[in-house]
Amino acid sequence: MFETLSERLTNTARNLTGKGRLSEANIKDTVRQVRLALLEADVALPVVKTFIERIRVRAIGEEVGKSLSPGQALVKIIHNELVAVLGSDSVPLDLRAQPPVVIFLAGLQGAGKTTTAAKLARRLIEKEKKRVMLVSVDVHRPAAIQQLQTLAGEVGATHCPSTEKEKPEAIVERALDESRRQHMDVLIVDTAGRLHIDEAMMGEATRVHAKAAPHETLFVVDSMAGQDAVNSARAFNEALPLTGVILTKADGDAKGGVALSVREVTGQPIRFIGTGEKTDALEVFHPDRMASRILGMGDVLSLVEEIEDKVNRDDAEKLAKKLKKGRGFDLSDLKSQLEQMMNMGGMAAMLEKLPLPGNVNPAALKDAANEKQFRRQIAIINSMTPGERRFPKTINGSRKKRIAAGAGLQIQDVNRLLKQHLQMEKMMKKMSKGGMKKMMRGMPGGGMPPPGMR
């Protein structure tokens, strides 16, 4: 997300390096570049105008400290304004109410409301230890009701059944009664949508909302919808008392303009962003961290939180003890590491959160460490016998041929994996004997990860 905007803004700031003061002359071209970057990222024109004016006023005549270049000073100004546009602070869900607390999801068809309902339920169950019930009032699409029931089973939520023959208001009333009877903490209502805004949909949404009397009313919007998302946000904001926004499909959106526009149009905080299809791919939206990501500064805090949340601590401790005792890093250990990285969205998702030097191309790194490559490596290891995984040196030519055939790949792929494992094994030995410094010195390129992990 924000790849286009990030690249343009960081290049613009870099062009100012070497100038001693941010003046009217050298700011004019920079402001024009920022304006073009925002427009290319599908940011709404009124938002662009306001944003640019604020930057221009703050940047002209800004004194540059001894340790700051004008580029860094401008990045600081843009960062602060991005944080302001995105909402300044993250706003958690307010669950301080008489249970069941009702969360109402509204939005157009195809925005991802049903999947988001399941993601939200999983988050509340796992992190907040809440008992959650899901109900769909989308009587126009029976498949949506069936989908929600399936997803509820996956995430461990209770599902309140409904049919296309019922009225949405009656479904909500029954779901409220059922959630009270079963002592639920939260009831999430998945509503109907249309491909476009129309009076019938808005009328139904308003009636169901009045019957549900929700504590939170969240507008779910597709990040890739562009200006349509801004128009629908404005319409829903006028029809319903929105309390927040959830951005979906952020992993497929390179522009990111919707995030800046919707926040400004609705005046409501962005609560979460959906970063994938899996039910755990829902991140809390932190405006300051997102602004840092846009400007190529990374988001190390979110990465640390994700590692703590998704990395299997028991497996990590077992590996650490194993290395400490001097036992080798075998191919089963490598497979475990690859699976954990995939669980975190792959290397590409991790790179998005890391601050990278200006001469490093993030796109090239992501292409070199994509999920497909991880899957191939895991397939190769799966084709090996337990003995071969434990003692890779026993893998001769005939075994390589068998392993490659079993994985549906070439012998060169097996050789590449074995070479990568050998380099990692050497690093692990150095780390167990002399700490991180020796490990980094032993890495190819004096600190770069081995081939396949770059």
Image (cartoon, rainbow, N blue to C red):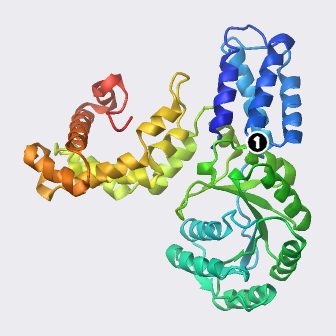
Residue 344: x %, y % from top left: 46, 52
Going 54% across and 68% down the picture, which residue do you hit? 126
Going 80% across and 40% down the picture, which residue do you hit? 84
Circle 1 Cα neighbour tier, 10 Å, few/some/many (<14 / 14–19 / ≥20): many
The image shows a total of numbered marks equal to 1
74 vs 187: above or below: above
Q: Nearer the viewer, residue 109 or 191?
A: 109
Q: Secondary structure at mark 1?
A: loop
Q: Nearer the viewer, residue 11 or 441?
A: 11
User: Residue 282's image quarter?
Assistant: bottom right
Residue 388: x %, y % from top left: 13, 52
User: Residue 5's image quarter?
Assistant: top right
Residue corresponding to mark 1? 42
Going 20% across and 39% down the picture, which residue do you hit? 415
Q: Nearer the viewer, residue 14 or 354?
A: 14
**Left or right, residue 248 beside residue 214:** left
Could one spot residue 88 in this view of the protein? no
297 vs 215: above or below: above
Going 67% across and 13% down the picture, which residue do you hit? 17
Could one spot residue 262 in this view of the protein? yes
Quadrant for the C terminus in the image: top left
29 vs 196: above or below: above
Q: Amino acid at mark 1?
A: Asp
User: Residue 188's image quarter?
Assistant: bottom right
Residue 373: x %, y % from top left: 36, 46
Quadrant for the N terminus in the image: top right
